[in-house]
Amino acid sequence: MPSAAEQLAANFNFSNFGKAKELRDRLLFTLGMLIVARLGTYIPMPGIDPNELARQLTQQQGGLLDVFNVLAGGAVQRMAIFALGIMPYISASIIIQLMTTVIPELEALKKEGEAGRKTINQYTRYGTVGLAAIQALGIGIGLEHWGTVVFAPGPFFLITTVVTLTGGTILLMWIGEQITSRGVGNGISLIIFAGIVARFPSMLSQLFEGAAHGSIDPLAIIVGLILVVALVGGIVFMERAQRRLLVQYPKRQVGNRMYGGEASHLPLKLNVSGVIPPIFASSILLLPTTIASFNAQNIPDWLQTIVTYISHGQPLYLFLYGLMIIFFSFFYTSIVFNPEETAENLKKYGGFLPGIRPGKKSAEYIDYVLTRITVVGAIYLAIVCLLPEWLIYRYSIPFYLGGTSILIVVSVTMDTVAQIQSHLIAQQYEGLIRKAKLRGARR
């Protein structure tokens, strides 16, 4: 079965694209919103000294701030109004998903359809505001402890920081929702995608400058480019991979006619958890390094030992990173996919898996298959993330979140191309329907 990108390449021509006015408007709207999101990463937060901030952040390289800086599109490095990025919204969404599995009221809302989804989205927005305010307060307190970074430390600076950064996150959340509803693609994912892609030119310039000055082996750049191409191909293949379970619907007689009897498929993605496991794993592993960097002069010996052993490229870091990616892959898959609910829905609509009784037995079989393919998906995620980490350490390439960035960029690109393809197909169908109506009118 050809992918969305292959179908788009086969069917695309400028005449069809020119006729798709709605798609063109959606693409322009998406581009405009992403430009606004990028401009916000260059508007500095009031009350800080940019030069002193840049000096302090240089000493924090390799820690958790680098991860947040990549996901925020460089806004943390400039301490812009969008410094928190969209991470509070993602964290709130994950927390709400976790709570739906343990709180019956939220689980009931989830089953109510569109009305329940809107209520859960509202709870997610409230959680985003709360998390953003807490993180902004922590950033304000941390900046005050960085010597002369803040011009006038005190309560007024803390209030200004909380209002500015929380407001920036709310604006980004609104932009993402507007892109999802009025543009093309998932707005939240596209904001992260734009932030990562925007840093590619500076990363490439650093690589080639390092090669010119001899600090980076030119062979490392060639190996890195080959690895990136191989990773992109592997990600595309694995993200499209599915395990399809055959679902049969029984025949039924209504009057003198027989209905039903058709077969369908239940698709199970190889990587259900997406990019969440690498982000969680890297955030947890880099936390000790970040804490130590904030107070490098007075850290205890045990913390210094931990930081030494779990620094980038160290065997213990690579082992723990891969282990945590595998753990979070299983953990997050168990949250977002419920085999019992899926089996119950199949039973409700009369579907069944051939050779397996509906209900509990079907749920056990779906869980069995899902566990097996999650093993493959978790190992795939670990390989995609560990290879760049090893390359970064082995050839001293500047830290850039490695495989996680590539994974996000490729996944979002595939999703956006699929949506563009669906809009073009819908436009072609509408044109065929209009022509059919006109022919019928002439007759």
Image: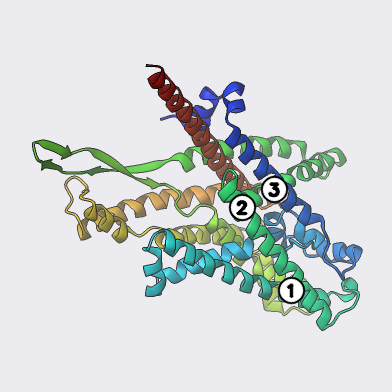
Mark 2 falls on what kind of element? helix
Q: Vertical placement of 425 versus 239: above or below?
A: above
At which x and y percent is residue 202? 79, 45
Q: Indicate which disc residue 431 carries.
A: none
Is residue 333 visible to the viewer in this orientation of the structure? yes
At which x and y percent is residue 331? 44, 63
Q: What residue type is labelled 1?
A: Val
Label 3: which residue? 34
- Residue at position x 57%, y 50% in the image: 180
Q: Residues within 10 Å of mark 1 (few under 14, many from 20)?
A: many
At which x and y percent is residue 50? 89, 63
Q: Indicate which disc residue 178 carries.
A: 2
- Residue at position x 35%, y 55% in the image: 371
Q: Distance between the residues labelled 1 and 2?
A: 24 Å
Q: How crowded is mark 3: few (under 14 residues within 10 Å), some or many (20 or more)?
A: many
Query: In front: 398, or 165?
Result: 165
Question: In the rendered view, does 45 fall on the left or right side of 389?
Answer: right
Q: Which amino acid does label 3 sit on?
A: Leu
Label 1: which residue? 162
- Quadrant in the picture for the C terminus: top left
- Residue at position x 40%, y 64% in the image: 110
Disc with the residue nearer the chain's start (1 vs 2): 1
Residue farthest top in this picture? 443
Question: In the rendered view, does 425 fall on the left or right side of 38?
Answer: left
Disc with the residue nearer the chain's start (1 vs 3): 3
Q: Vertical placement of 428 versus 137: above or below?
A: above
